[in-house]
Amino acid sequence: MEGPNGMNTATRLFCGDRPSVRDGITSDRVVSVLFGTDVEAWRSGWDRTPAGPPNREAVVDASDIARSGAVASTQVVPSGGLAHTVLGRTADGERVLDAVADHLAGAPPGTVDVLIDDLTPVAARGGVDSAAAFADGLLDRFEGRTGQIAMGCSFEGSAELLSRVGGRVDTVVGADDAVAAVERLYRDDPTTFGYVRRHWAEATRGIETCDRNYPQSKQVHAVLPAPETTPRTLGATLSGLVALDALETWGDTVGPTRYDLTAYRPERTWAVGAALAARVADD
């Protein structure tokens, strides 16, 4: 995406059990933000990448492991090419972004890459709005100043978080196993595909909130606060998730379709959401 100064920054969202945000990073300078990773584990992870560690890395540590303090502390290890800023988990998003800005100060545009290990801990602490606002702030402030921005979103992250952040980046990575199924649904049933693309996150929330094992779509719809869907459009979305192998129907009925929530596959649904986000990014 193009920043205010006209320079393009590649923005990517990495999805999965352990988001591989280091993939494709070849810059000599990196700023890494840690929300869910110990700094030692993060640093050792560079040895498993083809390019190896960058020559210079600034780590902004806002993880559970880091201690919190009223004033940020930065330790510089010249021999290891490391500047380690400890903020702790209580630091808010703006404070973290300010620390990133401090480490970018003076660097020529496009010479530093910014990595976020995982947005899911941010959502777990402060809600989806907090995590999405951090991602928006990161992109708004640093597009056009960095070479790449790579963010992770692990499986435990909510459907809303994946949908909201995936819609803002250039590329979504980590949904290969669901991409073919999504493309097949688009080709064979574009109307249902459209419902799934618009409403999969709300359908997921309804499935995970409903306490019935074999509900009709109207019963799933009834548990949603302020839904964007109607029972009919939600039903079409649920049917699409069945076609995408994330859900099953209960066959022993002659009335309205009932959905078998005991067969719900959250990991598959999440992968479908990542595939949909990737398609939106490509569009």
Image (cartoon, rainbow, N blue to C red):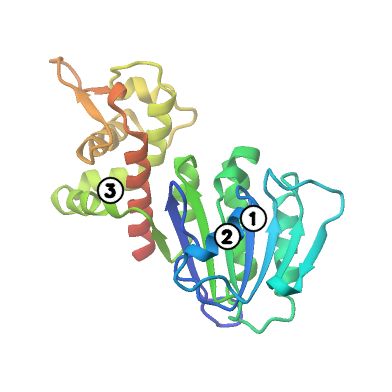
**Is tag 1's residue or tag 3's residue first in the polypeptide sequence?**
1
Q: CA distance from mark 3 to mark 2?
A: 43 Å
**Residue at image mark 1:** 40
Crowding around mark 2 (Cα neighbors within 10 Å: few <14, some 14 to 19, many 20+) is few
Identify residue for label 2. Answer: 44
Q: Nearer the viewer, residue 114 or 126?
A: 114
Q: Is residue 100 left or right of residue 1?
A: right
Q: Amino acid at mark 1?
A: Glu
Q: The residue under label 2 is which amino acid type?
A: Ser
Residue 167 at x, y = what percent? 44, 57
Q: Which residue is mark 3?
A: 194
- Coordinates of residue 79 in the picture (x, y in percent): 72, 74
Residue 158 or residue 44, whichever sits in front: 44
Are the residues flagged by discs 1 and 2 in contact, CB closer than 8 Å?
A: yes
Tell me, yes or no, whether the two marked residues, 3 and 2, touch with CB atoms within 8 Å. no
| 4 and 35: which is toward the camera | 35
Instruction: Determine the residue positioned at 30% across, 18% down.
Output: 215
Residue at figure coordinates x 15%, y 15% from the top left: 253
Dot 1 alpha-carbon crowd within 10 angstroms: few under 14, some 14 to 19, many 20 or more: few
Camera-nearest label, 1 or 3: 1
Label 3: state its secondary structure: helix
In the image, taking residue 92 as reference, residue 25 lies left or right, namely left
Q: How many C-alpha atoms fall within 10 Å of the one at disc 3: few (<14), some, or many (≥20)?
A: some
Q: Secondary structure at mark 2?
A: helix
